[in-house]
Image: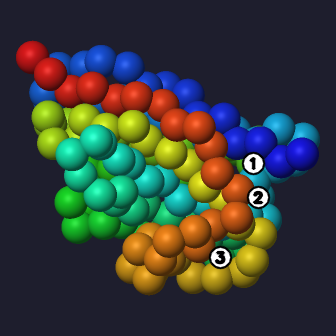
Amino acid sequence: QVQLVESGGGSIQPGGSLKLSCEASGFTLDDYAVAWFRQTPEKEREGVSCISPSSSGQTYYADSVKGRFTISRDNDKKAVSLHMDTLGPEDTARYFCEADQRKFTCTYYTLTTPDYFHFKGQGTQVTVSS
């Protein structure tokens, strides 16, 4: 069974950085499009970033994180990381990774269409507070 596991969350002060990781059990994510989403009890789920399968490597970022977050594939192709810099309280949320084996280009549509990605993780909490 395909499982995605997120890690790297935690508590950090404003202005700090964190690196989240999304790993898959039993397979590599090289041929999968992978996206990061975040959600808080007060806000709707927000698509944060997406990376197309390795054959393309195309990336997409929400305006709210553009220039601060970087999505990338780890060298062993088994994980996808989300490097988050200059974090602020507004970035506090539970972060989820999702993956899909279809070949598509990451766009605003892929990050805003419900259930677009087939496989989903359980999430990791990020809290930005002084």
Mark 1 = which residue?
77
Q: Residue furthest left?
A: 130
Between residues 99 and 105, which one lies in front from this camera angle? 99
- How far apart marks 3 and 2 lie (CA) works out to 10 Å
Q: Is residue 47 above or below residue 121?
A: below
Between residues 70 and 89, which one lies in front from this camera angle? 89
Q: Is residue 109 above or below residue 24?
A: below
Q: Which amino acid does label 1 sit on?
A: Lys
SS for dot 1: loop
- What residue appears at the point 30 percent right and 66 percent down from the top-left corner? 62
Q: In this view, does 98 lie above or below 62?
A: above
Quarter holding residue 98: bottom right
Q: Residue furthest front?
A: 41
Mark 3 = which residue?
56
Q: What quarter of the picture does the N terminus occupy?
A: top right
* Residues marked 1 and 2 touching at CB (< 8 Å): yes
Q: Residues within 10 Å of mark 2 (few under 14, many from 20)?
A: many
- What residue appears at the point 59 percent right and 73 percent down from the top-left corner? 116
Earlier-in-chain disc, 3 versus 2: 2
- How far apart marks 1 and 2 lie (CA) works out to 5 Å
Earlier-in-chain disc, 1 versus 3: 3
Between residues 33 and 17, which one lies in front from this camera angle? 33
